[in-house]
Amino acid sequence: MTDALEDSVDSANRTRAYAWAALGGVVYFLGWAGFGYWPLALFSLVPLWAALELSTGRPWQDALGVSWVYGIVMVAGGYHWLVPFFEVFSGYGSFASVGFWLAFSTFIGAQYGFYGVVYAWLRRRGWSVALAAVPTLIAAEWLYPKLFPVYLANSFNQLPVFVQIADLGGPLLVTAVAAMVNLTVFETWRWWRGVRGAPRGVWAVTILSVGLTVGYGMVRIPQVEAAMASAPPFRLGVVQVNMGIFEKRGEAAEGHRRHLEQSRELEREGELDLIVWPESAYVRSLPRELPMSGGPIRKELRAPILFGGVSREYADGSPKLFNTAFMMEADGVIRSTYDKTYLLMFGEYLPFGETFPVLYELSPNSGRFTPGSHVNALELGEWRISTPVCYEDVLPAFIRAMVREANPHVLINLTNDSWFGDSQEPWIHLVLAQFRAIEHRRYLVRSTNSGISAVIDPVGRIVARTGVLARENLRYEVRMMQGQTLYTRFGDWPGWLSLGAIAWMLIFRRGSEK
């Protein structure tokens, strides 16, 4: 009878643990960048920890299972727009697209599966919830391989005063402070239920960390604004013609005509130092030998033009294609280019596609691009301009490498989000990119085919933007900034610190939590 009762309680706890995990995943993606209900992010980790505590003392597979469910629900909800993306970008049918979406969610969600295993291991070694939860979260966000980064920090893009510490430690440092707020909610709830004593230490650390974070933001924002005011101005015009890549390929002349027409409109409004066209603005492939004349591209335009296109070269008689950003100077000559380094899986290449060419037959819309080999800036007179292409602007470590290598005055991202239609993806892309401006205290300009084109100032504020699926121009005077931040110099030091703390806790055992 006693065994049966214990089995019943055990089964009920397992069910509750998985229910908590699923609920937590929903809370996370609703509070994250796509839906943007950021207050939910202040307690989105609480259900996960509740689920893991219910699994304490059980086999490690239970910790893996509940935390993996949390991750799968979180990713599947936040990236639901991947289904139409796979259908359009790669040409898969609905059934295969749903399968890839589920596979993607399962793989990225495994980040939290591993998180749960390490958390449970540390708890069994006697370490507190706080020490098991926060360093492990930071290490998981930092180390787990993923196509698109997922940081808890991205939930707080609407709170400029809270995210200024990104110039000290990147998104990981913002995640650490947000995790402490979550921890306070969780430990206070456990105290209220009588599970533990009053978490005075957690309260003190959270109050201190939040206070320092907000205080730093209140001091740093005016400092950056003063630096912006004294920096040299640079007049930009951004063209958004609202044409997808297939439409541009099918109507190349119309796409070119629209870019020229809208560029003339910008020039009639006043002098410009640079006109920016987005990724794949010019669809006919261009040779890679420099310098070359851009006369047929610019026609009668006067201002320099930065535009995205395709460049080609031949190796052993076979063409190699590159997704390239071209800088055409005021005299109409192209003297510098940048090739996209991080290619988009399924869109610009297929994993194992060169080994198994039949994969390209199954995915007719996938490209066969070659990655670039450098992160040098494009030069325009005295100015250095770094030009991450497509989703390169959401990769903190990559942009840091760009800034360290080239010390650019401004970051200009050329991208094409038209594949995703009127979905949350263009907004998510914009939000994730905001942090790059804060991390390095540079203006970040985004030029897209169909939206959202935007200007983000060095404080991380969106100061100008277009709509989605709209034909518009942007005109804005950015400031050409210089210098290095602590994050530029030292990178993701919160990740290294967390990894060291985890290693210490795995080596040394602590007594049971009181």
Image (cartoon, grey):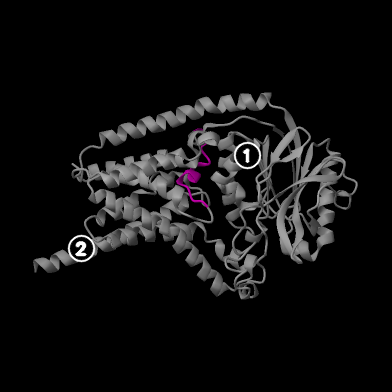
**Residue 476: x percent and y percent?**
73, 37
**Front of the two marks 1 and 2:** 1
Disc 2 marks which residue? 10
Position of residue 514 in the picture relative to residue 229 (left or right)? left
Position of residue 84 in the picture relative to residue 258 (left or right)? left
**Residue 295: x percent and y percent?**
89, 49
Which residue shows up at 37% across the image and 49% down it?
Answer: 45
Can I make out residue 19 in this image? Answer: no
Amino acid type of the residue tagged 2 in the rendering: Asp
- Please, is residue 2 above or below residue 442 in the view? below
Which residue shows up at 25% across the image and 55% down it?
Answer: 54
Which residue shows up at 83% across the image and 35% down it?
Answer: 271
Amino acid type of the residue tagged 1 in the rendering: Glu
Look at the numbered disc 1 and give the secondary structure of its residue.
helix
- Residue 356, quarter of the rendered image: bottom right
- Residue 302, quarter of the rendered image: top right
Position of residue 184 in the picture relative to residue 480 (left or right)? left
What is the span of residues highlighted in magenta in the rendered image?
149-161
Other-residue count near label 1 (Cα within 10 Å), few / some / many at <14 / 14–19 / ≥20: some
Check if residue 151 falls in the magenta segment: yes
Residue 405 circle label: 1
